[in-house]
Image (cartoon, coloured by chain):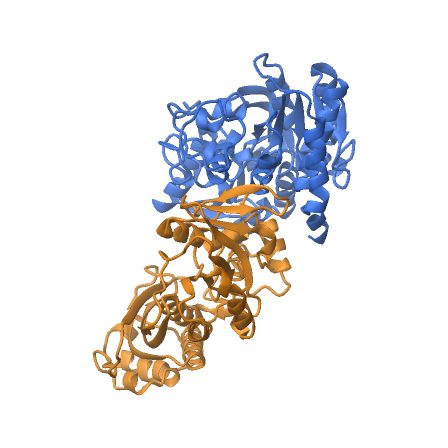
């Protein structure tokens, strides 16, 4: 962590902040794709240091946020079955489906355990052989390899009471769908660090080449983020969009081949529904034929049915960067971190939760303040 | 009683088994004469002054953790609640709710810890109660302690008294208890020197008040909800704005690493042996010097100021010079997916 300290020191960040202000010659809109970026930007007060012409939009990179109500409903249906334990990542338990959340199911008697890794869910299955342990397998390319490794481990050990609800998603397809939207006005992408460590920086080349978007892969410390933003502004100024890997200590051009192979062994691409974005072709990861016995939907005869998003909820448009949280009619009134309606308010990484928590804007407001008012 | 024996419903019946539990285990470790009398209540001596009175229940899981156990928390927590109004603790009550099947040896370990902590703190358990509930109706052991104390004549310590210009001091490192418990719950062995900070603060508070009459306005122990939530409560009650500087916050490196790993913010994690001290700006250096001379205050640090604005908010100046608001904790702290 000593290494990370340097990326948080003012000696390193102040010159970057100055250079960004100096380099910005026209209004620029950047989408930070990843939820961990969104959170880090708020947590370190990065926005308060940026010049007014630089707008940051949050993208679809919060795995909890993009999980649609139909999937949450399937998790809930599994939780309500007798002899089923749901072993889930912590920030999923408050996400509301059509009727309640895993937290409310737990309060009504369902067994819902928080785990920190899918392997922990497998360990739980080994310890409780009389129950079926179901792991809601959400996440992006970052979590998919560990889920795949867990499935392979379960196969090796012959564990029969472990299942997943395959709901993981892949980022490039979603970005592709977003960028094809003519209404989306974005000059550059701050590309995710963790996802890129798996898929490699070259995965973004099509966005630079086809859509003329500046791309910078960045880590999550303030200096990483500022360096990424500066790279984007310079690319935009020079009219030379490319993919700049500003996170070389973790990300290579080709990514982590071993992790990619793990994903490919266990999963195959399928169309997948994203909260707010709809169904995106080839953007989901479902279990391959030979691992179907781990599929909870099939084995427990769960139904994944289309579900209507909560009335008034604008998470979809917020995830697309079209709206800022205070422009949603529910923000700060019907939807707060204590009583979240939409997923963007639930997860710490969610754009609405981050706005609510860190920006001081507690009620609805117009588009006027794209820069968050901190005081 | 054999080492491997367990607590049964009989132990809570009020009959012979209860008497054996009380005399054989509880009175072995809690030796105050008033408790030994086994009267329906304790009658204390005569005290001149304002009486402070507080109660708290302890349901921590796990019951034993690095740096302490539920017994230590139950003693220190109530002593600290009294101390935070500037009161000198006089006596404690101890009520146990035990789940049927709880290990006798574990109960003995916990009561011994209560006895030891009381002795170290110089405060006695003078009255108590024991109940046993059927298996599944509680989680091992719950403890309630109440305490009374004598409030200082010369001070009026309250969360409503923070004033513009005041200094904000914390008596030591943050989040040690919260990280210890959450990493245990997660089954993650973080190693390093992480342990709960559970400790009584009445001596530190006593010394500060003794030396520093009138200059301390607020004392608060940032337990559940952590530093951020406690500061928000003070800012609200006093209708002031509090500005905290991130680089001044004393947080052990191992705690920081653990928080990054689990995806938690140390500002929202519990402390069980630390207090916030808000005092006159001019008195801040004296408070720091005095606190640092005592073991429970050796890592005391000035972390920020009460500003001239009356917004009821708390803001944090980040290490890179940015600014963000600190909100009270919402719900339980949840670890993040990645």
> Which color was chain B given?
orange
On-image quarter of the N terminus of chain B: bottom left
Toward which corner of the image does residue A81 lie, by quadrant? top left
Q: Is residue B257 left or right of residue A113?
A: right
Residue at image coords 44%, 59%: B223
Q: Is residue B153 above or below residue A235?
A: below
Pinpoint residue A65: horizontal percent, then vertical percent. Answer: 51, 32
Between B99 and A20, the one nearer to me in the picture: A20
Q: Is residue B123 above or below residue A272?
A: below
Pinpoint residue A45: horizontal percent, then vertical percent. Answer: 58, 40
Between B210 and A209, the one nearer to me in the picture: B210
Pinpoint residue A92: horizontal percent, then vertical percent. Answer: 48, 39
Residue at image coords 77%, 20%: A238
> Which color was chain A given?
blue
Q: Is residue B223 above or below residue B318?
A: below
Q: Is residue A141 left or right of residue B215?
A: right
Between A38 and B281, the one nearer to me in the picture: B281
Is residue B142 visible from the viewing direction of this image?
A: no
Tag count: 0
- Residue lying at the far top of the rendered structure: A182
On-image quarter of the C terminus of chain B: top right
Toward which corner of the image does residue A199 lie, by quadrant? top right
Q: Is residue B194 above or below residue A79?
A: below
Residue at image coords 60%, 47%: A119
Pinpoint residue B153: horizontal percent, then vertical percent. Answer: 32, 73
């Amino acid at each position: 962590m000593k290494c990370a300290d340097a990326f948080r020191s003012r000696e390193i960040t102040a010159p970057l902040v100055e250079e960004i202000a100096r380099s910005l010659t026209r209004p620029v809109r950047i989408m930070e794709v990843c939820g961990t970026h969104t959170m880090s930007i708020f947590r370190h007060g990065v926005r308060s240091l940026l010049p007014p012409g630089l707008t940051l939009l949050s993208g679809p990179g919060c795995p909890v946020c993009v999980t649609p109500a139909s999937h949450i409903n399937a998790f809930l249906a599994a939780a309500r079955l007798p002899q089923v334990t749901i072993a889930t990542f912590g920030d999923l338990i408050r996400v509301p489906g059509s009727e309640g959340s895993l937290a409310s199911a737990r309060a009504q008697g369902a067994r819902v355990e928080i785990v920190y890794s899918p392997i922990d869910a497998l360990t739980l299955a080994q310890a409780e052989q009389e129950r079926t342990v179901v792991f809601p397998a959400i996440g992006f390319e970052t979590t998919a390899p560990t889920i795949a490794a867990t499935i392979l481990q379960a196969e090796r050990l012959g564990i029969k009471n472990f299942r997943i609800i395959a709901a993981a998603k892949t980022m490039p397809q979603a970005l592709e769908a977003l960028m094809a939207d003519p209404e989306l006005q974005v000059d550059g992408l701050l590309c995710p660090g963790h996802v890129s460590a798996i898929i490699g920086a070259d995965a973004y080349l099509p966005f630079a080449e086809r859509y003329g978007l500046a791309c910078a892969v960045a880590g999550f410390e303030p200096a990483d983020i500022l360096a990424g933003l500066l790279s984007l502004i310079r690319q935009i100024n020079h009219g030379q969009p490319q993919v700049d890997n500003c996170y070389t200590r973790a990300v290579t051009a080709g990514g982590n081949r071993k992790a990619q192979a793990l994903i490919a062994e266990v999963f195959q691409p399928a169309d997948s529904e994203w909260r707010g974005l709809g169904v995106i072709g080839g953007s989901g990861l479902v279990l391959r034929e030979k691992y179907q016995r781990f599929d909870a939907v099939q084995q427990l005869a769960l139904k994944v049915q289309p579900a209507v998003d909560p009335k008034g909820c604008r998470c979809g448009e917020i995830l697309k960067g079209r709206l800022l949280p205070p422009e949603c009619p529910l923000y700060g009134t019907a939807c707060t971190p204590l009583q979240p309606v939409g997923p963007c308010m639930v997860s710490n990484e969610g754009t609405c939760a981050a706005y609510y928590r860190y920006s001081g804007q507690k009620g609805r407001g117009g588009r006027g303040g794209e820069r968050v008012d901190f005081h | 009683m054999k080492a491997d024996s367990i607590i049964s419903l009989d132990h809570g019946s009020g009959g012979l088994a209860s008497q054996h539990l009380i005399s054989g285990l509880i009175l072995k470790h809690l030796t105050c004469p008033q408790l030994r009398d086994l009267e329906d209540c304790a009658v204390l001596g005569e005290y001149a002054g304002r009486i402070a009175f507080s109660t708290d229940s302890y349901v921590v899981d796990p019951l034993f953790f690095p740096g302490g156990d539920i017994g230590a928390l139950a003693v220190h927590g109530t002593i600290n609640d009294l101390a935070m109004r500037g009161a000198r603790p006089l006596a404690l009550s101890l009520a146990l709710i035990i789940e049927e099947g709880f290990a006798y040896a574990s109960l003995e370990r916990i009561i011994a810890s209560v006895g030891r902590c009381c002795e170290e703190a110089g405060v006695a358990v003078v009255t108590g109660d024991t109940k046993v509930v059927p298996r599944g109706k509680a989680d091992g052991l719950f403890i309630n302690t109440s305490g009374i104390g004598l409030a200082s004549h010369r001070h009026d310590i309250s969360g409503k008294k923070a004033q513009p210009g005041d200094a904000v001091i914390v008596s030591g490192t943050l989040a040690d208890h919260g990280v210890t418990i959450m990493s245990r719950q997660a089954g993650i062995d973080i190693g390093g020197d992480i342990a709960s900070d559970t400790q009584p603060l009445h001596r530190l508070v006593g010394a500060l008040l003794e030396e520093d009459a009138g200059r301390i306005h607020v004392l608060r122990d940032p337990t559940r909800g952590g530093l951020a939530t406690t500061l928000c409560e003070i800012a609200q009650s006093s209708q002031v704005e509090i500005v905290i500087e991130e680089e001044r916050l004393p947080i052990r490196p191992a705690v920081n690493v653990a928080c990054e790993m689990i995806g938690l913010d140390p500002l929202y994690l519990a402390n069980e042996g630390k207090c916030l001290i808000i005092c006159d700006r001019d008195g801040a250096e004296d408070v720091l010097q005095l606190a640092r001379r005592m073991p429970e205050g050796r890592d005391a640090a000035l972390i920020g100021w009460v500003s001239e604005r009356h917004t009821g908010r708390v803001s944090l100046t980040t290490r890179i010079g940015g600014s963000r608001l600190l909100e009270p904790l919402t719900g339980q702290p949840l670890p993040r997916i990645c």
